[in-house]
Amino acid sequence: MTLNLKGAAGRDKPQPVHSMSEVKNNGGLAFPEAVAVSPVGDVYRGLGGMSLRDYFAGQALTGLLATVTGDVSYTGVATVAYACADAMLAERSK
């Protein structure tokens, strides 16, 4: 697979990864924390932590940046990283 991670004329041009009207599956929390456990064992999760989508994108970003040489559009790399994360979430939900 060949990825074009360079922006127009070698410059970053901020572009949204998705529009505000789109609802993305974020996969829930990557590292949910329990804040309470009932006497019967029900766990009530906390709201803190990053989404699984953000975690997957961060993992993809690490690999992408490790293989990039020369000028790079960080916006382009971020877009590709989130595309990888979305693909992983889609595969995970099958």
Image (cartoon, rainbow, N blue to C red):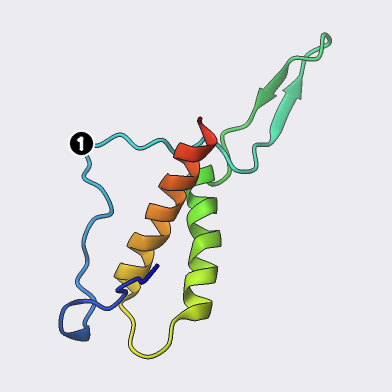
Question: Residue 83 placed where, x, y %?
Answer: 37, 53
Q: What residue is shown at x 48% (from left), y 51% (from top)? A: 54
Depicted 79 relative to depicted 49: above or below? below
**Taking the image as drawn, is residue 51 in sight?**
no
Asked if residue 42 lies left or right of residue 14, the reply is right
Residue at the extreme right: 39
Q: What residue is shown at x 54% (from left), y 37% (from top)? A: 92
Q: Residues within 10 Å of mark 1 (few under 14, many from 20)?
A: few
Q: Which residue is mark 1?
A: 21
- Specify the quadrant of the image occupied by residue 13: bottom left
Asked if residue 38 lies left or right of residue 54, the reply is right
Asked if residue 91 lies left or right of residue 5, the reply is right
Question: Residue 20 placed where, x, y %?
Answer: 22, 41
Depicted 44 relative to depicted 46: above or below? above
Residue at the extreme front: 1
Residue at the extreme top: 40
Depicted 83 relative to depicted 49: above or below? below
**Taking the image as drawn, is residue 55 in sight?**
yes
Badge 1 amino acid? Ser
- Specify the quadrant of the image occupied by residue 72: bottom left
Which residue occupies the foreground of this view, 3 or 7? 3
Which secondary structure lies at badge 1?
loop
Question: Residue 1 placed where, x, y %?
Answer: 40, 67
All told, the count of numbered labels is: 1
Q: What residue is shown at x 49% (from left), y 79% (from top)? A: 67
Which residue occupies the foreground of this view, 10 or 46? 10
Q: What residue is shown at x 74% (from left), y 14% (from top)? A: 42
Which residue occupies the foreground of this view, 83 or 14? 83
